[in-house]
Image (cartoon, grey):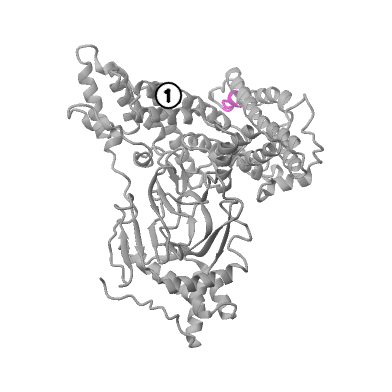
Amino acid sequence: MAPRCRPWGAVLLLAAVLPPACGSCGAEGGPLEPFDALYASGVEAYYGGDFAGAARCLEQALRSRRELREERLRCRRRCRGQVRLAALGAGPAGELPFFGALLRRAGCLRSCEEPRLGAASRHRAAEEVRADFQRRVPYSFLQRAYIQLNKLEDAANAAHTFFMANPEHMEIQQDIENYKTTAGKVSLIDREAKPHMEDYSAGVRHYDKEEYGLAITFLERALEGYYAEDEDCQIMCEGPQRFEEHEYLEYKAGLYEAIADHYMQVLACKHDCVRELATRSGRISPIENFLPLHYDYLQFAYYRVGDYVKALECARTYLLFHPDDEDVLENAAYYEGLLEGTLDPASIKPRKEAKALLRRHKLESHLLRVAAVGLGFTYTEPNYWKRYGARQDEHSVPSSISSEPEEGPRLSLTKKPAPKPDRELKEGGPLLYSDVKFVYNSQQLNGTQRVLLDNVISEEQCRELHRVASGIMLAGDGYRGKTSPHTPNERFEGATVLKALKYGYEGRVPLKSARLFYDISEKARRIVESYFMLNSTLYFSYTHLVCRTALSGQQERRNDLSHPIHADNCLLDPEANECWKEPPAYTFRDYSALLYMNADFEGGEFIFTEMDAKTVTASIKPKCGRMVSFSSGGENPHGVKAVTKGQRCAVALWFTLDPLYRELERIQADEVIAMLDQEHLGPSEMNINPKDEL
């Protein structure tokens, strides 16, 4: 089974310029083989049907990339120790000792690296290839190769490794579920996991279970790993930067300008290690307040196990980052009181490694700002340690905290206000149409910004819309002919409003029926805008008429979903209990709605879940005229259970409050409607004028 698409232009480019793989991945011994060449050989072997050769080359490519980094780290550490940079002296030749040391360190690096790596130019991979490895694309090929070789455990681990950096990838998610069924009990391993991030997550899990001893063990180990990774990150920033893109003979900068140009890029890279170490694989946004959070958890965990010295030490370390945090200040004072009479609380100092990191970080920031003024480039200092953010959604607070005596310490996590939404959340506004029936609100659906309505359209309109759907979708669905973008066990078909109107105007479907699709979507938009009491216009972001049909002979023992659990404007990461509002998610979507057309099928229930993508909070059985609407963010993960018999049809609607992201096809459809009205073709018989408020 080959991957469904081949979007990796870098791979195709490499395949064109490199010699054929012929089942070989480079000679044994000698300098390290470049990982980009091995990658290209692996992909070429895969598409040539040599799956054993593909797996071998891809594994070697991954290993080569790791060894390249390890060798560079080893040599840079070694040369740092062997050649110290001398201080500048006085007089006309005062800079010579410094530059002499610089030249000796450069020579040291070259003599150290060349025996294992060969010429440095061999390992300068294209940006597209580096991006593929960052996104873990080689593991997608590996998974498919291992399937062909019947190595299901290896395939499952490759799929899991890819999925951890690409949680929006529906097909891989389904593949992993299939491995769990076909391969029995599979313990999935993330082969690219960051140890400090894994230890942090484990520490938080134990903390939430009130297993404070284990929480301390993992969080302390996470800190040890963090500082080790920070040192590695700093060292790796000393490699080539954008400076290498300048043509050597055409670069006209003077000595000090050229050095400053390169060094500022190195310095910016080093300064951003804080963000790099707090960012999960495949994500853009870091875990907010990541490093300080370790000390915040630890100060309370140490209190719980009776180690007040460590509790005070961690509280004071946290205060280095946030000196005005009232809760931790109160906790520190409380710990001081507990220690009085046994030792001098003033002797308990913040941890040295945290002080050193902050001191370096502040100096880096100062130098970058100075350089921005002196060299004329733009620099804005990011807020690397925000106190409010993801953790309110990510971590539950142990129930026993609420039973703490008033004079006891508080976990500052419980006192942080949640971030304010970008708009006031309301619901319960008028439904505008007398025939629409209210069923459940957010509270009754166990969530936030949710509503369930009935009778949004009539039985006759459902039948008419279904006839339109059948006529349009036979001509091609909305996903370029794919059987299904979500599951191979169902046929997925769809059509847009503009397509319906085009077919109606051409006489391929009744024009009145085509216009009905346009009119009911407008009715749904007005209801959503009114019910959620939005104080600005709600625009269409995307409108899609969709049907899912169970394929005969493929329904026995199904364990997949028709549409896996997801959120509409962020990338749901169930492992981390987070939803990352960043591309490729449709981050501009604000509200969503599903308007159902029929009930004569089996399965297909719409479900809301918690952010773990497992705990179902509400289940809705579709029927004609029923509409569920909700805000599009991580507060509303949802999916569709397997359609096991018949065909399930609905109008899917996504809305935005930002006019910049209005649906282009909708604007074009508006123009078609205006043209039809001018030709006196009139609207559908449906009454789309809202009545007075109920």
Determine whether the residue tagged by mark 1 lies in a helix, strand or loop.
helix
Front in this rendered view, residue 494 or 575 = 494
> In the picture, which quadrant includes the C terminus?
bottom left
Q: Above or below — where is 343 with respect to 133?
A: above
- Classify 10 Å Cα crowding around label 1: few (below 14), some (14-19), many (20 and above): many
Q: Can see residue 143? A: yes
Front in this rendered view, residue 346 or 169 = 169
x and y, in percent, of residue 270 in the image: 51, 34
Residue visible at 65% across and 50% down in the picture: 4
Q: Can see residue 34? A: no
Front in this rendered view, residue 477 or 67 = 477
Quarter of the view holding residue 439: bottom left
Q: Which residues are the magenta region?
A: 92-99
With 428 as the anchor, is 269 left or right in this view?
Answer: right
> In the picture, which quadrant includes the N terminus?
top right
x and y, in percent, of residue 537 in the image: 37, 67
x and y, in percent, of residue 8 in the image: 67, 48
Q: Mark 1 points at which residue?
A: 218
With 422 as the anchor, is 582 left or right in this view?
Answer: right
Quarter of the view holding residue 549: bottom right
Q: Is residue 53 magenta?
A: no
x and y, in percent, of residue 212 in the image: 34, 23
With 273 as the anchor, is 43 left or right in this view?
Answer: right
Q: Above or below — where is 256 with respect to 588?
A: above
